[in-house]
Image (spheres, rainbow, N blue to C red):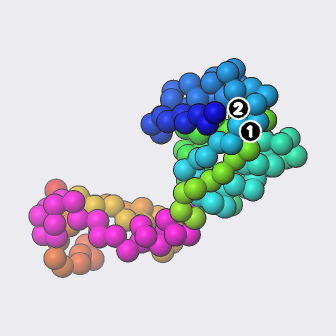
Amino acid sequence: MPVALLAPRLRLARLKLASVLSGELAGEKPLVALPYPREAEKPLNLYAKGLIDWPRLKLALRDIYGDFYRSWLWTEEPLIRALPLAEARVKCYGASHSEQVKRGATLPFWPSGPGSGARWISRSGGGSWRAGRASTQASTTPLSHQRR
């Protein structure tokens, strides 16, 4: 009988799912469908089968998520570490990471509309973050000199 386990993206919820996987479903070789990027499916299955170890899995996930992998992994780690205990098979159904980045790059980030004075944050090409206020005109004034 198929079982669906749903939980919010919180570390505590992932701990609960991990206890169900390693307890009630241990040895049943369940198929675990996860909302992770499709690129994560292969390394997660290799880890679940015991063919790669934890440090190698982290490297594979870092290649997929980039610098974001640490915060993502902090939430997901309990669930991922339970996969080998349950002898689980993994199916990732989320959008690929490149699709997520492309979609995120095309979305406007004006919560209240341009010119509303709403704060924004963006990442420049060099990888540094900068914050400011939304307006209809671009500002070249350094943040330290802008009025708040």
> Is residue 62 in the magenta section?
no
User: Residue 119 falls in which quadrant of the image?
Assistant: bottom left
| Residue 16 x %, y % | 56, 25
Packing grade of label 1 (10 A; few <14, some 14-19, many >=20) is many
Residue type (three-letter) at the residue carrying disc 1: Ala
Q: Residue furthest front?
A: 1
Q: State whether residue 67 appears in this view.
A: no
Q: Which of 46 and 115 lies nearest the eye of the viewer?
A: 46
- Distance CA(mark 1)–CA(mark 2): 9 Å
Q: Which of 137 and 81 lies nearest the eye of the viewer?
A: 81
For the point 37% across and 65% down, which residue is it?
122
| Residue 28 x %, y % | 76, 31
* Quadrant of the image containing the N terminus: top right
The local secondary structure at tag 1 comes to loop
Q: Specify the segment rendered in magenta.
A: 97-118
For the point 66% across and 61% down, which residue is it?
39
User: Residue 77 falls in which quadrant of the image?
Assistant: top right
Q: Residue furthest left?
A: 116
Packing grade of label 2 (10 A; few <14, some 14-19, many >=20) is many
Image-based side of 45 in relation to 114, left or right: right
The residue labelled by disc 2 is: 82
Query: Compared to 63, does 20 lie above or below?
Result: above
The residue labelled by disc 1 is: 88
* Quadrant of the image containing the C terminus: bottom left
For the point 60% across and 43% down, which residue is it?
73
> Is residue 108 in the magenta section?
yes
